[in-house]
Amino acid sequence: MKIFNFLLSLTITVILIVLLNQNIGNIPPMGKFLSPFTGFWHNMMISDSKTPSDLEIRGLKEKVQIHYDKHLIPHIKAKNSHDIYVAQGYVEARHRLWQMDFQTRASAGRLSEIFGDRTVQYDRKIRRLGLPFAADNLMKSLETGETAEMVKAYSMGVNNWISQLSYKDYPIEFKLLDYDPETWDIYNTALLLSYMSNILATSDFAIENTNFVNTYGDEYFDYLYPSYEKSPDPIIPSGTPFTLSKPPITRDSFEISDAAVGEALFEKESDIIGSNNWAVGPAKTKSGNAILANDPHLRLSLPSIWFQLHLITPDMNVSGVSFPGTPAVIIGFNDHIAWGQTNAGRDVRDWYDIDITDETSYSFGGVKYELSSKNEIIKVKNGEDYIDKVYYTHFGPVTYDPTFPAKTSKKYLASRWTAHNASEELQTFIILNSGKTLKDYKEALNYYKVPAQNFVFASVDGDIAIKQQGQFPYFTDDRGRYIMTDASNTGNWDFIPYDENPITVNPERGFVSSANQHPTDSTYPYRYDGHFEQYRNRRINDILSSKDNIDIKDMMKLHSDNFNMQAEESLNTMLKLIESRDMTAEQKEAVNILKQWDYFNDAEKLAPSYYQSWWDTAYALIWDEMETELLMRKPEKFRTVDLILNDPTFEFFDIRNTSEIENASDVLWLAFQRSVDAIEKWKEKHAQEPEWWRVKNTRIMHLTRQIEPFSKIGIKIGGNKGIVNATSTY
């Protein structure tokens, strides 16, 4: 009996040991995770997240000093450039190691290694879009010259931090997801730069445009998607003269593909971007010095996409923010200059409908080309490897084919993207970090290609400037707007010369600004497409034009400005179009709230909730024609407002699933009824008044978008998309 009891106890113990050290579904090994010595409890007991003030680690040539201020911002002082980047890598890894690891895995298409089969399609998408392919090409520039030494030093610092970690020291996400950090190298930094391009260089709508034209025709397309809206208020002031050094490209007419695509493979940056920047010259400031402001409003996340720090060497004293995983300061200032960025929003990707004839060749435009392929091996946690064959053309990877994604016609669509090209962006920031003059700013931008940005500049000399810098394909026709299947076009690109990218220096109006709007007016000689803002830019320019004696407080106030220009330009007409309708008491109350509104989307106000609910409902009803099995792009909000104001009987106001023929008034009335009902239901559910911040429900989500306890939900803040304070739900 004793032997039996012993064997039973031993068996149960062994079973428990095995079970507690294995994943069960998405649950980490509970023995490791709950261990009081090495598990998540240890993360709770970490009280000092600061690096020692005197840093002495392997790879440093001399001692480095690190001081943290009250905001936990590290101020790093080194005696040479090698040591400053070793220390930056060490410090950023100490604070952001899991973020760095996760984002590079996402860019490499390797999330299935930690999430299992639920992310296999994501990994396929990333590899077919060519992010690892882009990183491979970027490596060519990162492995030579000054940037190579910089990235090697940074990687050395990251690995110094990783090498001293044991399981108990891991950031909690590693423990929750049950995997280990990997050694950092130059390729990881290249992947991270590709990751940023995938966020910021995605303003191409060729697939959506092709679907629309093939469904509704050219006439409707040209009417709904004009190249320039009526009042773009561009980055470079209207009337600025431009030069054209390249002769126009003469080509035969091209053909639009009949490919039918029903699924988007990437999130459009227009859905999440809302950045602003400006610089005011000495003549308009109270101090007589130039002042620069920048709000690079990307998707809010925890950890933040940015890492704030201060780097000091005998040749450099620069403060600002970096992308964890890349050396140098990306947005910031030093003793002489300041600079910042907003996204350009230009289309820098083309799509080609090709014919694959066999495993080694394909044809396009009647010309036969060599075809290569790569078996992408996707490692799957707790599952078998997934092998995906990806073809490569002279354009780039074949992203769409008969096997991927599910909602597409059986076509082979290859893409060419500027992010696939080798580039030298880090050299831009090496020069800016220690730059002193306008000349240095211009030189730095000559190395910058992707993702295209609006670089604002100010100096202690009183100079201000802004330039839209990137590598932009040069076209004089509409071929880049659609998926091409062309009898003559080889798909070769030419590029706009860097010195003819839009720039203005010390303009007469005394300030420069950008807010993701059109870079130029229609007199610019090179054609371009993309997604462009129409409201924030005009609000910023109105405020800066109207003010003199500007100081820092004015800049801060403008950063958080909540004025809703779209509502100012649309609401009165919207109300007039429904004023003759019979209304309930709740609907009359809503109208009264809207009539008293001053158009500011302040957090505590009710009117923004009623307006946004009404607008969103109307917008969906107006463009119900786009809700098909095919992927289509709804016209811009600015264009929609223009149609309500000036073409209220336009055919697309008619709702498809009703027997009546509706106009703008009918659609707005139906939308108003539904939106008021929605607000009433919200009030009943939450037992609160629909203050804007509550309805908007701004949240800062954890990077995984799944761990809600690590997120911040329901932040009390105003603003919204299209407003200078561009804080929307995310």
Image (tube, helix red, strand yellow):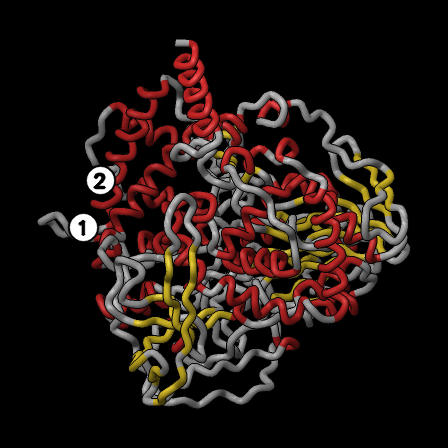
Furthest residue toward left: 659
Quadrant in the rendering for residue 567: top left
| Image vertical order of residue 84 relative to residue 447, above or below | above
* Image height of 632 relative to 258, above or below: above
Camera-side residue of 140 and 29: 29
Identify the residue position indicated by label 2 in the image. 670
Residue 557's place in the image compared with 42, above or below, is below
Q: Quadrant of the N terminus?
A: top left
The kind of residue on which mark 2 rests is: Leu
Residue at x 36% of width, y 81% of height: 360
Q: Position of residue 142 (x, y in %)?
A: 67, 66
Mark 1: which amino acid? Answer: Ile
Give the percent coordinates (x, y) of residue 14: 45, 25
Give the farthest residue toward the top: 1
Q: Secondary structure at mark 2?
A: helix
**Residue at left offset 53%, top offset 31%:** 710
Using the image, tell me which numbered label, if any, was put on residue 655. Answer: 1
Marks 1 and 2 sit apart, C-alpha to C-alpha, by: 10 Å
